[in-house]
Image (cartoon, rainbow, N blue to C red):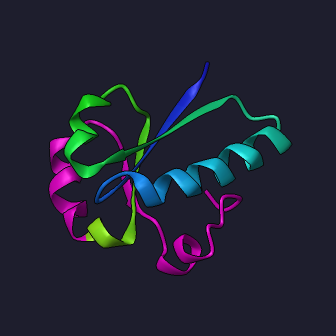
């Protein structure tokens, strides 16, 4: 079964760089996952995701999204985001 991880930021651009790093880490670990980056306006178009990771710039939406979505929602640590630490997530 493929796990689907959704990353969201203001426009979907900065998270796409982190997605690439995460994909590289997943391949190295032989994990069967799909990772997608979207802007915050497109989160509700990806309701089939298993988990949502929020970029630091939209971390203030954590509580609302957690109650609105039927999936776990977490924020990405600012330091990890800045360093594009794909291995951690």
- In magenta, the rendered stretch is 60-89
Is 60 situated left or right of 14 in this image? left
Q: Give 22 or 32, whichever is nearer the viewer.
A: 22
The image quarter in which residue 86 lies: bottom right
Please report the residue visible at 63 percent of the width from the left and 32 percent of the height from the top: 33
Per the image, is 83 magenta? Answer: yes
The image quarter in which residue 47 lies: top left
Q: How many marks?
A: 0
Please report the residue visible at 31 percent of the width from the left and 54 percent of the height from the top: 11
Quadrant, the N terminus: top right
Q: Position of residue 70 (x, y in %)?
A: 26, 36
Quadrant, the C terminus: bottom right
Per the image, is 88 magenta? Answer: yes
Q: Position of residue 46 (x, y in %)?
A: 32, 30
Please report the residue visible at 22 percent of the width from the left and 70 percent of the height from the top: 60
Please report the residue visible at 75 percent of the width from the left and 46 percent of the height from the top: 24
Q: Position of residue 80 (x, y in %)?
A: 58, 73
Above or below — where is 53 with respect to 80? above
Find the residue positioned furthest to the bottom: 79
Find the residue positioned furthest to the top: 1
Is 55 situated left or right of 83 in this image? left
Above or below — where is 63 with respect to 67? below
Is 39 situated left or right of 52 in this image? left
Q: Where is residue 42 in the image (x, y as percent from the top left)?
A: 25, 39
């Amino acid at each position: 079964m493929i796990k689907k991880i959704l990353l969201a930021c203001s426009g979907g651009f900065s998270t796409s760089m982190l997605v690439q790093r995460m994909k590289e880490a997943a391949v190295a670990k032989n994990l069967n996952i799909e990772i997608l980056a979207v802007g915050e306006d497109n989160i509700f178009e990806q309701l089939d995701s298993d988990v949502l990771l929020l970029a630091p710039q939209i971390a203030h939406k954590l509580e609302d999204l957690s109650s609105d979505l039927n999936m776990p929602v977490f924020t990405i640590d600012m330091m990890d985001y800045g360093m594009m630490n794909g291995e951690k997530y």
